[in-house]
Image: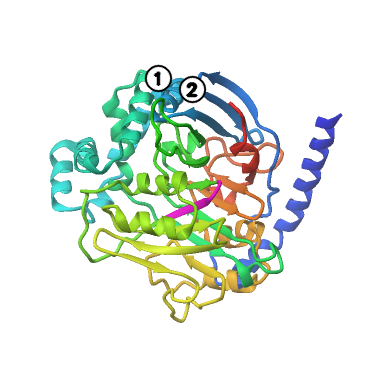
Amino acid sequence: RFLRRKMKVWFAITVAALVLAAAATARATDVGCKGTDNTFPIWSGESKQIKSVDNGRLYVTGPAGNEIRVMHLYGDAYTAGVAHGQLMKDVMTTMYPQFFQWIEGQIDPYIKFLPKFMREAIETGGVRAALALTADLTKKYTPQRFIDEMKGIADGSGLPYDEILGLQMFPEVIKAQCSIVGAWGEATVNSTNGGLLQLRALDWGIDNPLVNYPTLIVYHPQKKQNEDADPGHEFSILAFPGFIGALTGFSSQLGISEKVWLHYDGKSSRVGMPWHFLLRDILQFDVTLDDATNRMVNNRRTCSIFVGVGSHHDQELRVFEYAHESLNEFDDVNYPLYKEHERMNGLVYVDKHTQPDHNVCFENLLHDNYGSITAETIIRHAVSQMQTGDLHAAVYDFSNNDMYIGLAGGAVPGVMDAKAGEVLPAYARPWLKIDMNDEFSRAQ
């Protein structure tokens, strides 16, 4: 009876969403956007365990056609890695060849932005040579725990360590567009009582084989035997099997977002700590904005990107211009001001275009909802009308410790149609809502 009741509620919500859809297209034109409102119901429900090993459990959550794997890993870096490899061996065996073949075909538009030595490596040995070179250049600055975890994945899956290592390096070679929003205080005073909301939208194309393998990885760090080092706290990364860096992530303390800084004109380097490993350390070990800032200041940085960091403790977000030579911090008071980028208390945002961007879509949408911005406002209006977050997108609700996730994919039976084999962007599909209190407290 409980299941029938849930299905009736889901059906009722779906019908209401379809009725609302008729008004969405006209509204987009009014605010200077190309997209339309996303009126699909936001799914929330229980996850189902499908596999377990020592130090790891694998679940699936979401409705048919819009499911995501949720993998829980326990223990120190190596034991968590072994569990990761054991749980995902079959998936990784299929995904890795697909991904490396795809990435070879994607490199041409990015070559001109790479250092000369990287371009030469690609010309002589292909993308794999560039990934191997990047691994060599960053090894000195990569904490041993990442190496231990990758070795664990290799041992657990049976895949070569060099394959696991090479996959980790692609964010240092190929970047994505993406969008960042932080809203708190006056921006959310009438909706979340001033609580912080954060958007991370990943625009990396939907011809990408990774659309088939979305995975939320939840870590429950534990001390290595006979060591006293702080293992950190629970955290999650929205990624795919075999990848351990943080492109998108939310912890019990902080959230991170990222976007390429494509037209940075300063000096770059590949000798340093991979940026996605550094962002993961922020999730695992840091609590405050000052903690995260100090970590970025005190580590040797590599590529030029924008970073968004939101904090439970501070209930605010900062955006950083993160580069090898510099680190510039922006809040709602000092971020760049120009005609299409108004300053508003408790609001910081960077859209998917090259900055400074003179597109008015984001500004108008956020201005229209200012004071009453919610997670649903961001999902239904800002993300969908801006058409940002094609591969995946996430909204972190710090007040309720909820993570909303949008995924690229096909049809969702009973909710959204699509042609056979058609892949639609995350911003145009139904979203999932995951209670991270439940995930972070899930016992081994």
Closest to the observer: 269 or 123?
269
Look at the image and say whether residue 315 sits in the magenta stretch. Answer: no
**Disc 1 to disc 2: CB gap under 8 Å:** yes
The kind of residue on which mark 1 rests is Gly
The residue indicated by pointer 1 is: 156
Relative vertical location of residue 34 with respect to residue 203 in this rendering, above or below: below
For residue 40, side relative to residue 145 (left or right) = right
Q: Dot 2, how many residues are within 10 Å of its Cα: few (below 14), some (14-19), or many (20+)?
A: many
> Can you name the residue that lies furthest to the right here?
1
The residue at 66%/57% (across/down) is 376
- What's the image's color scheme? rainbow
Q: Position of residue 258 (x, y in %)?
A: 42, 55
The kind of residue on which mark 2 rests is Leu
Magenta stretch: dominant SS? strand
The residue indicated by pointer 2 is: 87
Sequence-wise, the earlier of marks 1 and 2 is: 2
The residue at 16%/36% (across/down) is 125
- What are the residue bounds of the magenta stretch? 252-258
Looking at the rendered image, the quarter that the C terminus falls into is top right
